[in-house]
Image (tube, coloured by chain):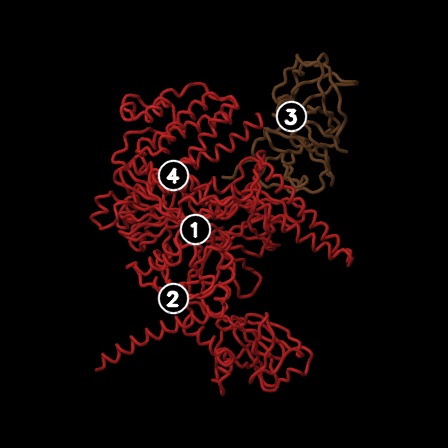
Chain colours: A red, B brown
Amino acid sequence: MDDLLKEFLTETSDHIEAAGSQIVLFERDPSNAQLIAGIFRLVHTIKGTCGFLGLPRLSRLAHAAEAMISHLRDGGRPETSHVSLILTAIDQVKFIIAELERTGAEPEGEDTELIARLTAVRKGEAEAVVAAIPPLDGEPAEVAGEINPPMAVTDVPVTAPEPAARHETVRVSVDTLERMMMLVSELVLTRNQLLDIVRRRDDETLNQPLIRLSSLTSDLQDSVMRSRMQPVGRLFAGLPRLVRELASELGKPLQLATLGAETEVDRQIIELIRDPLTHLIRNCADHGIEPPAERAAARKAETGTIRVSASHEAGQIIIEIYDDGRGLDVGRIRAKAMAMRLAPEADIARMNDEEICRFIFAPGFSTASAVTSVSGRGVGMDVVRENLEALGGSVALSTTAGQGTSFFLKIPLTLAIAPALIIEGEPGQRFALPQHWVVEVVGLDEAGGPSIEWVQGASLLRLREAVIPVINLCELLMQDGKGAATSSCDRIVVMRLRDFTFGLRVRGVADVQEVVVKPLGSLLGPLPLFSGNTILGDGAVVLILNPGEIAQRLGLERVSDFRVHARAEEFVIPATRTRMILFSAGPGPLKCLPLSVISRVEQFDTAIIQKGDNCLVVPFQGRLMPLLMVGDGIDPTAAPQCPVLVMAVGGEPMGLIISAIVDIVDVELDIEIAGHNDRVLGMAQIGDAAVEVLDGAWFMNNARPQAFARGQVKRFHVLLVDDKSFFLDMLSPVLSVAGYDVTTTDSAAQAIMLMERGAKFEAIITDTDMPDMDGYALARTLIADQRWTCPPILALASYAGPIIQQAAKASGMVTAVGKFDRRALLKSLSDVLDQATIAKQTIETDLIARLHT
Amino acid sequence: MTISATPSARAILAPVVQRAVATTRIFTVRVADETFGIPVAAVHTVFMIDRLSPVPLAPVAVMGLVNLRGRIVTALSLRRRLGLAELNVSTRVAIVMEYEGEMLALVVDEAGDVIDLDAHDQIELPRHMTASRAAVTQAVYRYARGLLSILDMTAIYALTPAISQS
């Protein structure tokens, strides 16, 4: 194909999708000249290029569409039918482009009817012509005129197209990216080999450049990986149109809001979640949102809201699909689950609402009594779940009767790379096991530890209170399913898939690596046990095990036998073992503290320890850290270095000077003799020795009284709103070090959403200057809303001048502080929160006083 | 030794119009003292395999997976495919080919020369050839001192999956 044509096709397919959603936005907001001008420009460009490339059919169609759009641009009122007509034209353009991509030539045929209708609109004869012409044959999407009542698809300000801030970009083909990815993988392998050789040679001169090479390679790998990422906005682009169509199909006015369109995810994943997302939105519109009359009766806005938001969370992307409809009818789901015998009746009766709701993911489950063309066919939710699980993701939901339902899709950021355990079957035989499913790895070699028991040929692992089915890896790999001797396989990898916990017995776990997942070759035939293969750091090829298949071999029902597992009835509190750090400090018995209170163990040069005001201090992480002596008999200056246990108190560190660390032990702590002074809780027996159990709190309170009080009384939760990630990144650590829990968000809309979802904050700090909605407007909105009591809001401005203070106070905010004035920020925050706590206590004191009188 | 060829494998692997071509370029390989021909256009490179990861439960002819400069390639043993016993050697010669967009390695005893065959030298498949061998043979040519079978790569790569577990 001609290069010019190829470029034209890629460019156009990208833009045409956006044009579809823009026209829908325009329908809602006809005053936005920018939108229609953008679409006009696109169609105009298509027309021009077609003439140049010699594509008569596309050119004629574009010409007619251009003429109509220009009519709208020049102030023609956009009617619903006009917009539908333009959408039809866009579909037709897409169809022709797809054909061009496929065959290199325009498809046969003419678009006379469509062109006639487009031209007619301009002449003001739209309705008449539409009525006279039958629907087009074989063309995508239905047409014009019949939308009744005219549905408004609105778009909340958060998604209003921003005036494009142009970044320099270059178009790179996916093949090039794939090739770069491959070359980088190879580079990594070569680097690893080199590292291996140098390690054996022990050549000092090579070390420095090799470390540099190594980090460069990792950076390169990271960047290439990142270049495969795309914003989920691509996925969202088609949604306004989908919702518009649903609105007219179902006769319900709907509005769509999308959030987090800039969240990035691997391009492969975007394509894979398109269908599940579409399905869930259809479902929201059809089953979730009530008909307008019902909404009016329930005192809800007639227009139903569907909100799709994306965000990153711990290496995963979370997509929430929310509707403010009637919520799931738990009673009906329960009844239907019983009728469909999805689980024993007694189990269903015992299940809580959450467990009941999960039945909607069972195959063939549909609660709509009227089957509609949109989503009532009873296929779907199970497919959604199956698709997501195939990606290593999951779907969950939360629902409130009468208020709405949220579906949460959890998806890994990339399919291409996944952390995996490298496990051993037969000696020298390695496999990768995706870590995503792994709960823990336990050993069978310890006395009194977990053990394998056999019940009529089936092996089970007794692990703490649970009994888990286990299969030997060697057994899985044998043609006839008969295992070899298994005595040397003494590690069990415990995995969980949905509610099913199971174990895989292996020889050992060699490593944990990030593996690049590649599909299996087709010659290998269907091998459900493996989900792909990968190359390890040492260049060896290993197969990736499929946990889903292992679970099935162990009796987890296929999706078609879906059943919700009832919760274990009894809960036995296991004996608590505490991990203690055992150390000596001067003369006297050994001492211990729970390891969890220790954040680090440091060795300090005694020379840098100084006598401060009443205590010892040492520079630590750029600040001064107070040091306390554990025993009286230690002379910290005696040796050149002394070990220090660092504890974090409400975000501020303090240190304990000790003599030496002896051991770390897991014990069931039983203090037998109470302590004789404040710093010692008492004596306990650990092993053969009597050990002093120290009171960590006493030390914390002595070294950092304020931080300790703050950490003890309450950790305040603060919401930080700023559209510039620079400030979020700069300020959130400042706040968390000061002992606050911090949630950050980059827009006012998202802050409001968090509050809508019921997030509780003790204070909100917001930037004043943000696009879409500024900090003042945010404050006014939050304070005016009756659904919650708004916490105190602080304004964050580039400087806290008197005018800004005034504006902040006028908007109901407590105060304004400068972005760079860290101290003032912490001071204001602490004032505000102390005020809030004290104020609350006054209420309580008053109340008690009144009750007593 | 590395021999490269153009990667238009698909065109060659399709049933060849036998009369129309005057000469055919053939890559020869040796397996168990017998010489076979492979259409040269199908061949990418020849390389030595010293490290191979077996694939449990895969068809018998699959020797395993190899790392060919960062690409994972399925290695197929021509010996096993022809129902012969495997050689016990540590390094093996593999012919790397592309088949339906996928890279494959065909493990042989020895890689031979590239030769040109004349269309006139083609003879009919011997009628008493065993059915299993006839199924993977595309044509037989008179060549130098003897006869040369050209392998039908599509047939070679059509593997029956291993017995699935109940």
The three-letter code of the residue at mark 4 reads: Ala
What chain does mark 3 sit on?
B
Q: Which mark is residue A33?
A: 4
Nearest to viewer (mark 3 / mark 1): 3
| Tag 3 and tag 2 share a subunit | no
**For the residues tagged 4 and 1, is the chain the same?**
yes
Circle 2: element type: loop
Same chain, marks 3 and 1? no
How far across and down, in percent of the image, does residue A253 sit? 28, 41
**As shown in the figure, which amino acid type bears the numbered disc 1?**
Arg
Q: CA distance from mark 3 to mark 1?
A: 47 Å
Depicted A76 relative to depicted A809: above or below? above
The residue tagged 2 is: A762
Q: Nearer the viewer, residue A111 or B108?
A: A111
Mark 4 to mark 1 CA distance (whole Å): 50 Å
Mark 3: amino acid: Ser
Q: For residue A498, which numbered disc appears in the image?
A: 1
For the residues labelled 4 and 2, say whether their Cβ atoms are less than 8 Å apart: no
* Pair 3/2: label in front: 2
Q: Residue at x 67, y 23 (%)?
A: B151
Mark 2 or 1: in front is: 2
Residue under the image location 57 percent in, 36 percent down: A173
Q: What is the C-alpha distance between the residues marked 4 and 3? A: 53 Å
Tell which of A570 and A371 is nearer to you: A371
Which SS class for mark 1?
Answer: loop
Q: Chain of mark 4?
A: A
Residue drawn at x 29%, y 76% as measured from the top left: A844
Which residue in the protein does label 3 denote? B8
